[in-house]
Image (cartoon, rainbow, N blue to C red):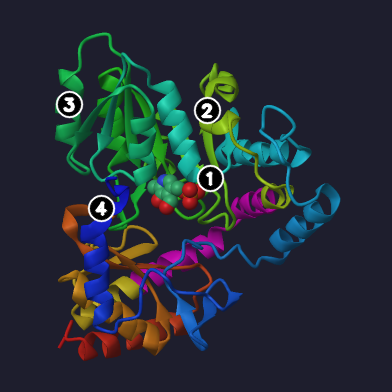
């Protein structure tokens, strides 16, 4: 018998080597208690959370929590069925209406996760004779959506407008084309030049899908994302998003103005062949989305936090993923995995949680300490974070 697990041996060995140095496993941390969107207890210690996707701090919002409790009482703990059978409750329609209102778009389709939204939409709309042109740094769910479908996949260099144009021009005349972009790229926290890329895509006859997972709620005047901030909402054919970040719960969606969009509910397998979201989840999501429409002050404070942290980390001597803060994600580039893990642990011991990100999730084989800010981080907390980075950075030799 061939052990099917032998393919994992190099990874098992790398993990064992890392942990043999006595370092805490960075991928197995337990949040023993979560006190607020910005503070948890980890290893018995008060820990500032700087590695969540809770950008707008909605997880403990009293209205959001109350909506979930009410739905749990009134509709029970789960739907036990697909959206196309018994799994569409009033709450699923209500959250889809909230999304249509939030984006000012005609159609909204809710999936059980953002991962499934990409899987479902990409694999369903791009068929055998079609081409998907995508940024090489696209999220795993975009790649998996491509893998699930039958279209030809054409990657182009990250955020490179000319490379996108060249790829598009090489596609045979008359073929269906879908360009897949992200508003904010989650590893480095950088923003796509959507305006230029969408213009190039449209000039070459392609439809455009933008994943706005990390910009919803925060970027753009109404929090609709990078497409809104760059004034190109009307040229985007499909926006993919998630409830697991700014919305503060779990679920995914696609919004669109395409007149035939609703047919996807019958042909999109990751929508049809899975159970729908629990009533409590869609109720919390709908309440949160409606509150996000009216959150300009929180958006402004989150920008302040992002700028403050970016400037402070640069001043301390860390190398960052972007020269200017472009989103709520600030990536600190580590020289290697061992130093990254040591720095991650030193920060945790100081009382700070960040994400340790490593290949294959990261571009160019980089190890990153990803910091993601929350609109509810106070100015004092950002100050505390910088003090902890200074201490951990000096202790591990990352800075002088
Ligand atoms: C760009 C992007 N798209 C989609 C997803 C998937 O979202 P979800 O957590 O809802 O599955 C993520 C999650 O990290 C993401 O970063």
- Of callouts 1 and 2, the N-terminal one: 1
Look at the image and tell me in which quarter the C terminus lies: bottom left
Please name the residue shown 78% across and 54% down the image. Answer: 72
Position above or below: 370 against 185: below
Instruction: Identify the residue position indicated by label 4 in the image.
Output: 6
Upstream in sequence: badge 4 or badge 3: 4
Give percent across and percent down for residue 335.
Answer: 15, 71
Q: Are marks 4 and 3 in contact (CB under 8 Å)?
A: no
- Cα separation, mark 1 vs mark 3, equals 30 Å
Q: What whole-number distance in Å separates the C-alpha atoms at marks 1 and 2?
A: 14 Å
Per the image, is 246 magenta?
Answer: no
Q: Which residue is mark 1?
A: 113
* Mark 4, other Cα within 10 Å: few <14 / some 14–19 / many ≥20: few
Residue matched to label 2: 269
Where disc 2 sits, the SS reads helix
- Above or below, 115 against 387 in this view is above
- Front disc: 1 or 4: 4
Q: CA distance from mark 2 to mark 4?
A: 32 Å
- Residue located 31% across and 78% down the image: 344
Residue displayed at 22% across by 66% down: 13
Name the quadrant containing residue 169. Answer: top left
Residue 286 lies in magenta, yes or no? yes
From the viewer's side, name the closer residue of 316 and 115: 115
Numbered mark located on residue 167 in the image: 3
Q: Is residue 375 left or right of residue 393?
A: right
Span highlighted in magenta in the image:
284-308
Q: What label does residue 59 carry, if any?
A: none
Pointer 1 local density, CA inside 10 Å: few below 14, some 14–19, many at least 20: many
């Amino acid at each position: 018998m061939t052990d099917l697990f032998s393919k994992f041996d190099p990874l098992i060995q790398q993990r064992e080597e890392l942990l043999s140095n006595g370092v805490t496993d960075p991928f197995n941390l337990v949040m023993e208690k979560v006190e607020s969107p910005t503070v948890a207890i980890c290893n018995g210690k008060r820990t500032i959370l700087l590695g969540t996707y809770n950008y707008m701090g909605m997880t403990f919002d009293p209205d959001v929590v109350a909506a979930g409790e009410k739905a749990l009482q009134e509709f029970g703990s789960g739907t036990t069925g697909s959206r196309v059978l018994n799994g569409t409750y009033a709450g699923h329609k209500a959250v889809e209406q909230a999304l249509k209102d939030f984006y000012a778009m005609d159609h909204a389709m809710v999936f059980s996760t953002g991962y499934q939204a990409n899987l479902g939409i990409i694999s369903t709309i791009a068929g055998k004779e079609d081409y998907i042109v995508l940024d090489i740094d696209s999220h795993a769910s975009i790649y998996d959506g491509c893998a699930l479908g039958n279209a030809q996949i054409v990657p182009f260099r990250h955020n490179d407008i000319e490379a996108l144009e060249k790829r598009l021009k090489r596609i045979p005349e008359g073929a269906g084309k879908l360009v897949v972009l992200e508003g904010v790229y989650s590893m480095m926290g950088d923003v796509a030049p959507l305006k230029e890329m969408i213009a190039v895509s449209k000039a070459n006859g392609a439809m455009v899908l933008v994943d706005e997972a990390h910009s919803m709620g925060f970027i753009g005047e109404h929090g609709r994302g990078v497409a809104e901030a760059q004034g190109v909402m009307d040229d985007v054919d499909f926006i993919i998003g998630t409830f697991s970040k700014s919305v503060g719960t779990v679920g995914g969606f696609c919004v669109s103005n395409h007149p035939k969009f609703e047919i996807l509910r019958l042909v999109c397998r990751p929508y049809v062949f899975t159970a729908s979201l629990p009533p409590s989840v869609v109720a919390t999501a709908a309440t949160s989305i409606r509150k996000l429409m009216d959150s300009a002050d929180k958006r402004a404070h989150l920008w302040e936090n992002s700028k403050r942290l970016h400037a402070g980390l640069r001043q301390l001597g860390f190398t960052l993923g972007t020269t200017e803060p472009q989103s709520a994600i600030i990536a600190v580039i580590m020289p290697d995995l061992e130093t990254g893990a040591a720095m991650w642990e030193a920060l945790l011991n100081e009382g700070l949680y960040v994400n340790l990100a490593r290949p294959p999730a990261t571009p160019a084989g980089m190890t990153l300490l990803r910091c993601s800010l929350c609109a509810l981080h106070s100015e004092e907390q950002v100050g505390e974070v910088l003090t902890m980075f200074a201490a951990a950075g000096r202790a591990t030799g990352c800075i002088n």
